[in-house]
């Protein structure tokens, strides 16, 4: 909430206003990368977030009994540290547009304690940090060659 797209990136444009370079503002990004896992770890360590209950029928694997029966208390604990990985992706969003997303991938190993067994699971989630559309020039011509292989390329020419 404290940052905008321009806070995370340094954008260089040419004389016509076209984007020539997008670089990461490493100081801001490193602050976010270090702050988010600390805050997540604090929330996961709160006892109110670690204890919950599931209906006994949900353990049976049948849709008929799911959500029915007495509550079974479950406890979840963190197993190890949180891992974070900054990701950036570019996707086409039209003939002359590119969608740019910056997100943080978060991995956390947890141990789930039930009366029946102990389960270790990895939770993976992504937090979108910024998203923007980069608009380029409209081309004079456009060819969609998706699905064209070496075998059928001659059909385009004819």
Image (cartoon, rainbow, N blue to C red):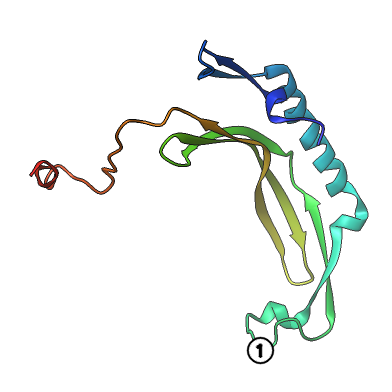
Q: In the image, residue 11 lies at what x, y percent?
A: 60, 18
**Residue found at x 68% / y 29%:** 5
Between 75 and 99, the residue placed more toward the observer is 99
**Residue found at x 74% / y 38%:** 81
| Location of the N terminus (image quadrant) | top right
Q: Residue furthest top?
A: 15
**Residue found at x 48% / y 39%:** 91
Between 106 and 45, the residue placed more toward the observer is 106
For this view, does 144 lie left or right of residue 26? left
**Residue found at x 81% / y 42%:** 40
Q: In the image, residue 42 lies at what x, y percent?
A: 87, 42
Q: In the image, residue 79 lies at what x, y percent?
A: 74, 46
Q: Which residue is mark 1?
A: 64
Callout 1: 10 Å neighbours few (<14), some, many (20+)? few
Q: Secondary structure at mark 1?
A: loop
| Location of the C terminus (image quadrant) | top left
For this view, does 32 lie left or right of residue 150? right
For this view, does 50 lie left or right of residue 143? right
When the figure is inspected, residue 116 is found, relative to residue 77, above or below; the finding is: below
When the figure is inspected, residue 37 is found, relative to residue 64, above or below; the finding is: above
Q: In the image, residue 147 lies at what x, y percent?
A: 25, 49
Between 152 and 104, the residue placed more toward the observer is 152
For this view, does 7 lie left or right of residue 91? right
């Amino acid at each position: 909430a404290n940052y905008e797209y321009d806070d995370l990136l340094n954008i260089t444009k040419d004389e016509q206003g076209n984007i020539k370079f997008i670089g990461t503002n490493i100081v801001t990004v490193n602050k976010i990368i270090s702050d988010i896992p600390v805050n997540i770890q604090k929330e996961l360590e709160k006892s109110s977030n670690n204890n919950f209950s599931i209906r006994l029928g949900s353990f049976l694997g049948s849709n008929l009994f799911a959500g029915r029966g007495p509550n079974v208390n479950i406890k979840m604990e963190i197993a190890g540290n949180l891992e974070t990985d900054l990701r950036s992706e570019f996707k086409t969003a039209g003939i002359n547009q590119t969608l740019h997303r910056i997100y943080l991938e978060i991995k956390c190993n947890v141990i789930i304690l039930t009366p029946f067994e102990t389960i270790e699971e990895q939770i993976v989630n992504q937090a979108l940090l910024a998203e923007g559309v980069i608009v380029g020039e409209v081309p004079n011509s456009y060819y969609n060659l998706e699905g064209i292989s070496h075998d059928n390329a001659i059909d385009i020419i004819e």
